Amino acid sequence: MPALKQLSDLLSAKFPDAFLEVTEFRGMLSIHIRGGLILDLLRMLKTDPRFAYNFLADVTAVDHLKKGGHTRYSVVYHLLNQYDAKRIVVHAWVDEENPALPSVYSLWKTADWQEREVFDLFGIRFEGHPDLRRIMNPEDFGFHPLRKDYPLHGRGERDDFPVVGRTIGSKWPADRSFE
């Protein structure tokens, strides 16, 4: 695939210390990069006319706890070129001991709440974010529930929540015959 080879050559030359690989799955290109230079890479993908990925569709994260990968966490950016309707995925691999990346809020204002969600649920910090605080969990909640090492049933934080009892009954009167 020529586009894959061209992109791989360009990125390895432009980001020799950060570039990891370019992969393709079902026609979708994915760039894998060490997280420290993610802002520079995304700026190039947005502003360089050869790419023009001008729309940030989504920011999410993956915890590769036992699955393997370049590091434990990857922050995943889904980009769209609105002129050609082309998409690309960028994986920024983040160090487990200090999970932090530069914020891309300066490139796309839509990153505001998306980065906050990743911070809240995975604990990955976005340096330079204008308002990095929890968006779903209380500020004093000390955990990040989408990490793979978070217990499936929680850590007991819901033990004192009131339980709403529900009864399920038949919608048919008890004396109704089904003959």
Image: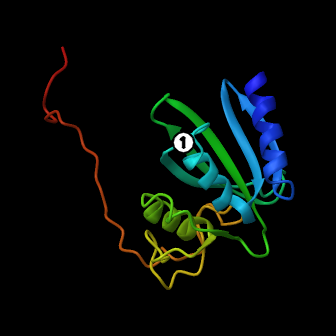
The residue furthest front is 49
Residue 24 in the figure: left or right of residue 108: right
The residue furthest bottom is 140
Image x and y of residue 40, in percent:
67, 59
Which residue bears the numbered disc 1? 53
Q: Is residue 148 visible?
A: no
SS state under label 1: loop
Dividing the image into 4 quarters, which one contains the C terminus?
top left
User: Height in image: 100 above or below 148?
Assistant: below
**Residue visible at 67% across and 54% down in the picture:** 41
The residue furthest top is 179
Image x and y of residue 152, in percent:
62, 60
User: Height in image: 176 above or below 110?
Assistant: above
**Closer to the camera in the image, 13 or 179:** 13
Image x and y of residue 44, in percent:
63, 51
Dividing the image into 4 quarters, which one contains the N terminus?
top right
Residue 87 in the figure: left or right of residue 111: right
What amino acid does circle 1 point to?
Tyr
| Residue 60 occupies quadrant | bottom right
**Residue visible at 54% across and 40% down in the picture:** 52
**Closer to the camera in the image, 38 or 70:** 38
How many other residues sit within 10 Å of disc 1, few (<14), some (14-19) or many (≥20)? many
**Residue visible at 59% across and 50% down in the picture:** 77
**Residue visible at 49% across and 29% down in the picture:** 85
